Image (spheres, rainbow, N blue to C red):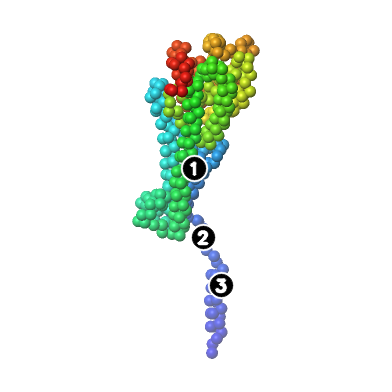
Amino acid sequence: METGPLLIRANAANGRAAAQIGRFPKRSFKIKVSPVTFWHVVSILAGLALIAVMLWEAFETILLPRTATRLFRFTRLFFRLLWLPWEALGCRIAPGANRERFLGLFGPLSILLLIISWAVGLLVGFGLLQWALLPAPRHGLDELETSLYLSGTTFFTLGLGDVKPETPLARLAAMIEAGLGFGFLASIISYLPVIYGAFSLREVTILRLDVRAGSPPSAAELLRQHNHRGDADDLDELLRDFELWAAAVLESHLSYPILCFYRSQHRDQSWLAALTTILDACALLIVGVNGRESRQAPMTFAMARRALLDIAHIFRPSDAQAPAGPDRLPPGELARLRDLLLADARLLAGADADDKLRRLRATYEPAAHAVSEYLLMPLPPWLPPPENGGKPTSAAEQILDADGAADVSTV
């Protein structure tokens, strides 16, 4: 049996096979990312980023009881961009009731638009997630529109059921969105009463000043009225109340800066005018009125000044310490102020007193001018307006003047 040639041929075949196995073809491996995969990743990252930004902004605005100090904030940028055209339109309206009515719409309207922007941001963010989590290759524009619709019905908990998430991750995202939507609406419902509660408390104290200091309020009218009736102790009590009011304004307006845009419902009144009038009156009392030292005036002055400076820092950090605008009390007006107070309250005169008053004014008037310019809120005068002809400007004095200082219990 001839086995030799067969073995030789078998060994040769095995050798050729081994040689072929040992040869590896040179091939270049290239990783190709399809457009669907790329947009898939981009959609997930964009959706997560948008959700995170909207949730954090809502948390800082509604729940965080202090002013966030980050360089970039969506809420701050939103208010500033919205206020710029609104301010420009307001400047085209002549000063008066029409301008105040127009500017007064900004606060409530901006809150409504801010809440809508948060909701739209969350809806779009979850819509992008739902679109990215669809089974491939369904990632067209029609599917994106359907995903946004699914996100909207889930966020507002409509429960229509005509479109459903198709993958386990998509179902998980829908559950999270439904819970966040419910919590978001509950937070908004609790946020609005806090805003309007703080606004109402602020306005009650402003109305008290309207009765005692005139409309618009002035430090001269406030001091003249109290000294005319000999109510020095009552003035200290009023300043004590305004110290607490300034602290409340500082806390509420730093926590909710949108309150600064809410304007008073009464003519010639504003939180800025009230705060500045109290600072003016305290400055005069610190300088010296009737040779009497007021223990309450320095404390109220310090609290009101801190409130004004901190609030001014929210809007214009660089302008809070800028030089003051037009002089609110030139030398001629200061002489008129002394003449007006001469009968009821003698203001300390002399170069030292004038210099002390000037230094006190320099600590708060630059901030007052900055806020006034930004919010289009006029600052109060030091003296009652000349058109009053020297007549009482406060409601209380008008009643007493009409009755000849009679008993006003029947009024």
134 lies above or below 196: below
Residue drawn at (52%, 42%) of the image: 63
Label number found at residue 58: 1
Quadrant where the C terminus sits is top left
Kindly report the distance in space between the C-alpha atoms of the residues bearing marks 3 and 1. Answer: 70 Å
- Closer to the camera in the image, 199 or 1: 199
Name the side, left or right, on which 91 lies relative to 285. Answer: left
Label number found at residue 329: none
15 lies above or below 103: below
Q: Amino acid at mark 2?
A: Arg
Q: Amino acid at mark 3?
A: Ala
Percent of width and height locating residue 266:
43, 26
Residue 115 lies in what quarter of the image? top left
Label number found at residue 27: 2
Disc 2 on helix, strand or loop?
A: loop
Residue 314 in view in this figure? no
Label number found at residue 18: 3
